[in-house]
Amino acid sequence: MKKLKNKKIAIFGTAGFGGSEEYFNKLYERSKANIDSSNHLLGYFYCQGKMPMTVRDKYIDLIKQNPEDKNLQVSLDNFDKALTHPNKEDLDNVRAWVQLVTK
């Protein structure tokens, strides 16, 4: 991205820790740091995405080691929810977003 100059750039992607606009904004800010200021940023679109099964295995191990940590179960539930993403709704939403920012 650092090599792009004088372009219109729209950033989109998936993230396993989906559903958090705050997290998506952090990803966008990190991306922006790698984009030359001569470019025009159109914005970003992120949605939830699948994670490797090794991540799920890690959560299971951590839950066994720390059964009192309820945040680990939340992370495991999020992992399971992410298995179906990006889904049709996500793809429809990104198509609508692209049409909006490229007008």
Image (tube, rainbow, N blue to C red):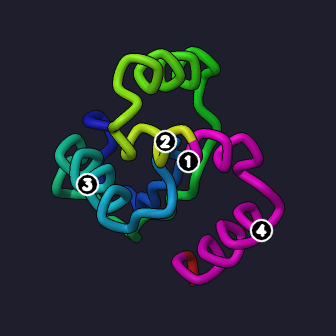
Amino acid beneath label 3: Lys
Q: Using the numbered discs, state the Cα–Cα distance from disc 3 to disc 1 in whole angstroms.
A: 19 Å
Amino acid beneath label 1: Asn
CB atoms at circles 2 and 3 under 8 Å apart?
no
Q: In this rendering, is residue 56 above or below 47?
A: above
CB atoms at circles 4 and 2 under 8 Å apart?
no
On residue 78, the disc is: 1
Instruction: Please say whether residue 68 is one of the residues in the magenta stretch.
Output: no
Residue shown at 24% from the left, 52% from the top: 32
- Image coords of residue 100 (percent x, y): 59, 83
Q: Nearer the viewer, mark 2 or mark 3?
A: 2
Q: Using the numbered discs, state the Cα–Cα distance from disc 2 to disc 1 in whole angstroms.
A: 8 Å
Q: Using the numbered discs, state the Cα–Cα distance from disc 4 to disc 2 in whole angstroms.
A: 26 Å
Q: In the rendered structure, which disc, 2 or 3, sits on the residue that comes first in sequence?
A: 3
17 to the left or right of 4: right
Determine the image quadrant of residue 43.
bottom left
Residue bounds of the magenta highlight: 77-101
Q: In the rendered structure, which disc, 1 or 4, sits on the residue that comes first in sequence?
A: 1
Q: In the rendered structure, which disc, 3 or 1, sits on the residue that comes first in sequence?
A: 3
Q: Nearer the viewer, mark 2 or mark 1?
A: 2
Determine the image quadrant of residue 65.
top left
Q: Secondary structure at mark 2?
A: helix
Residue shown at 61% from the left, 44% from the top: 49
Q: Secondary structure at mark 3?
A: helix
On residue 102, the disc is: none
Amino acid beneath label 4: Glu
On residue 89, the disc is: 4
Residue annotated with mark 3: 26
- Image coords of residue 3 (percent x, y): 29, 34
- Image coords of residue 1 (percent x, y): 34, 37
Q: Secondary structure at mark 4?
A: helix
